[in-house]
Image: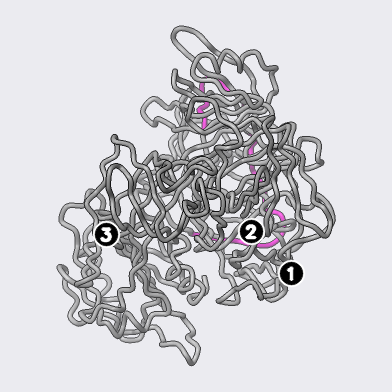
Amino acid sequence: MNALHLARRCLNGARQFSHCLLAVGGLSCALLLNACSGGAGTTSGMNSPPPPSSTNGTAMVTLTDQPGDFLSYMVNVVSLTLTRSDGTVVQTVPATTTVDFAQLVNLSEVLTAQQVPSGSYSSVSLTLDYSTANIVVDNGAGGLTVPAANIINGATMAPLVSPNSQMTVTLQLPAEDPLVVTNGTIANLALDFNLTASDTVAPATITSSTAASAVTVTVNPVLVASLTPDTTKQIRVRGPLVSVTNTSTQTSYTVTVWPFFTAAGNMGQFVVYTTSTTAFTLNGTSYTGNAGLTALAALPAGTLTAAYGTFDTTSNTFTAAEVFAGSSVPGAGLDSIEGTVTARSGDTLTVSNTFLWPHAGADVTGGQVTAQAMGAGSMGGGGFGFGHWHGQVTVTVAATTTVTEDGQTGSFGPPEISVGQHVQAFGTFAANAGQSPTLDATSGSVRLMITPLWGQFTSAASGVVTLNLETLDELPPAAFNFAGTGTSSAEDAMASAYTVGVPAALTIPALTAGFPIAFTGFVTPFGSAAGSAPPDFAALTLVNFSATAGRLHLYWVPQAAAAMSPPPTAPFVAPLSATNVVMTQATVQSAAVHVVRIGPATFDPGSVSAGLSFVPSTSAPFMFFAIGHRSSWQFQTYSTFGDFITALSGDLNGTTALLGVDAQGPYDETTGVMTVNVLAVALSD
């Protein structure tokens, strides 16, 4: 990724990112090894998934993503193959599937649950097709759609258009840690397509005045993998209902997996387990536990469902926290948009940063990407396609609108929908050529989804935290019009003194003013917040960053322009030590990007006069050190800091330059010391 573009993102605190050098944070296997390009990927020797048998197991493949600069990144997955150690190749995605990677930042999607032959699998290959890609970069004002001719293959530097629109990424799994499929069990493979590391956006700074024709995205795919799903993210399983089991010993239902926007095909069958607390929303009606499963059983086979939950790697079972079915699933019966309410006037909502699912029958299938316009006209430099779009949607609600709140019981209505709330609205969409698009939800429904916020701590008293709001549902305060949120204009929510109600079950930490703190929950109903009324936000969870490890990123431009410092060939204070490695302040400042991120907050390690020190952790349960060589894309990994330093000392021979550093661990912004359990460097050789 362009270094200045990274700096803009990091120092603005817009999103987390990971360097392309490595994948860390508990991944059992990692690293992009091979990216190929050209026409259709080869299928020689591929086998279709065999039917269930005593010699087969289930390969559950989930797909997720790290944050990037994109509001939408829709491409087609045309192939996902597993290669067994004996050379057997199994195709696990038999049909082209459209994926929007920008929607996977906080979610893992079950891509396939196919039966495959038992055995040890040593590699996985993912083929992406960009021929109908819809890539929208974030310009802070609704986004810019990148022209097809400006989406570039990083290997050939040619546009990713037919007949050369496909790229295949092959990931070799470590010999000591392969994907093992055994008879009658489920093997997990969690894939992470890292948008940040995979794509370079130019120009470095994109604003509301930047023309779409001036923006290019250069693609060098980076894929990482783990043999266990990311427990920090919900997993979604989507597909038509096959059957329901409701007995004294098992409460579950079975679906045929249809990932993302798929509307046909068979990616394998999958069992979704439910509990007495599972929340169901079926055709706009809410249920809990067995009542929901009973209502689900009354729906016809083939009803579209979507479940959100977690996978237990011990029992190999997926248990749903929430289940949606029928018209409550985007794309099933009604048009749907998902986004953030940024203003409200009466029964009219302004929803920003929206994503559109057209209703079933809108001639959009799983193998198509935004080619179908949902009406003439454009807004903010982009059209109205099947995916993220640029600008805002006006949503109309009424007393007849059904309102549900994720994970909550009770009676809800339109008054619960307030500014800052993340919503999914169902109704009738109109593109309205030359005007703002609209969604009429008066006879539809609105789902209130759990919403994140973070800010700088100000004070706490009587279960209420006051903070200086930095982002609400990942949008800055300037995006919101808080008029009407309070009982009067004087009591409307204020970003500089935003109040969060914290339940007694959550412990409010002792923080100094200005320290970051984050919450998830729901915005207080419209017209009732602040002052003597309830706080602006009702928290469900609280995140205290006082003990959170930092993530360091340093990056030098390989061919530095005249205005930039060249990559250093002697980046550390000599001699390198197995107990403490030091980089001077001047060297840190010479990097095009120098940032430490602790939770949502960013710090500049170049501001510390003592420089930056790396000290190995003595207590971390997981240690990972790596050296990457840019010219060959070869990686060496080490389990001890001493071995890593010995190798690094030999590699830094006076001509090899340091291009980047990624590190993880507690960071002291006063002394500049980072106690690392993860440290990786990229060298120019």
| Quarter of the picture holding the C terminus | bottom left
Residue 224 pos. (x, y %): 46, 53
Q: Which residues are magenta?
A: 33-59
The reply to whether the magenta stretch includes residue 48 is yes
Left or right position of 56 against 464: right
User: Is residue 392 something one can see in this rendering?
Assistant: yes
* 2 or 1: tag closer to the N-terminus: 1
Q: Residue at x 38, y 47 (%)?
A: 500
The residue to which callout 3 is attached is 665
Pointers 2 and 1 in contact (C-beta within 8 Å): no
The residue to which callout 2 is attached is 167
Is label 3 in a helix, a strand or a loop?
strand
Pointers 3 and 2 in contact (C-beta within 8 Å): no
The residue nearer to you, when weighing 64 against 601, is: 601
Identify the amino acid type marked 3. Answer: Gly
Mark linked to residue 149: 1
Q: Residues within 10 Å of mark 2 (few under 14, many from 20)?
A: many
Left or right position of 171 against 281: left
